Image: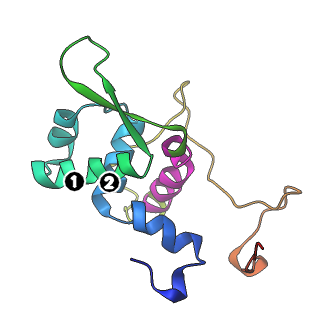
Amino acid sequence: MLDDNNLQCPVARALEVIGDRWALMILRDAFDGARRFSEWQKNLGLAKNILASRLKLLVEAGLLAQQPASDGSAYKEYVLTDKGQALFPVVVGLRQWGERFLFSADEARSELVDDRGQGLATLQVQASDGRVLQAGDCQRRVIRHS
């Protein structure tokens, strides 16, 4: 639950939903095509009760939706909603940060490539006019609606 100091902070609110390691790993796998409970359990090695609670949280938050399995079986599948799809740049940004700072040059790692097999450009924060911004170029302000 957010305290009074964080009620107006979008980062704090986002972390209430996706700030858990497993939630982000589930979303990462969803972007990679995972749709079934068993796929996440195999990929993540996560206990069933923890996986079930994280999937429930992501569904309740509107990031994933349950639907009947596409193969016609009795299973349910989880699919990213538009709200969940909108987190793709966040996951890519985390990946790019990890690639840059958490691996040595000769260390094996996975790589995200486009549908032509090409690497991705590094994400950048841009002003509405296209200027690339750094943290020192930005400031927070509170918007009050009446």
Q: Alpha-carbon distance for marks 1 and 2?
A: 6 Å
**To which residue does mark 1 refer?**
53
Locate residue 50, reporting x and y percent: 16, 55
Residue at 42% across / 52% down in the picture?
A: 61
Kindly identify which numbered label has been placed on residue 71: none
Q: How is the image coloured?
A: rainbow
Placement of 44 over or under 125, stated as above or below: above
Give the quadrant of residue 125: bottom right
- Which amino acid type is shown beneath numbered disc 1? Ser
CB under 8 Å between discs 1 and 2: yes
Give the quadrant of residue 114: top right
Placement of 21 over or under 71, stated as above or below: below
Q: In this view of the protein, which residue sits in the foreground, 45 or 14?
A: 14
- Which amino acid type is shown beneath numbered disc 2? Leu
Locate residue 20, reporting x and y percent: 32, 64
Q: Which residues are magenta?
A: 84-98
Residue at 52% across / 82% down in the picture?
A: 6
Structural crowding at the residue carrying mark 1, measured as other residues with C-alpha within 10 Å and reported as few (<14), some (14–19) or many (≥20): few
**To which residue does mark 2 refer?**
57
Q: Is 93 a magenta residue?
A: yes
In the image, farthest residue toward the bottom: 5
Q: Is residue 3 visible?
A: yes
Locate residue 78, reporting x and y percent: 33, 33
Q: In this view of the protein, which residue sits in the foreground, 145 or 93?
A: 145
In the image, farthest residue toward the right: 129
Placement of 85 over or under 131, stated as above or below: above
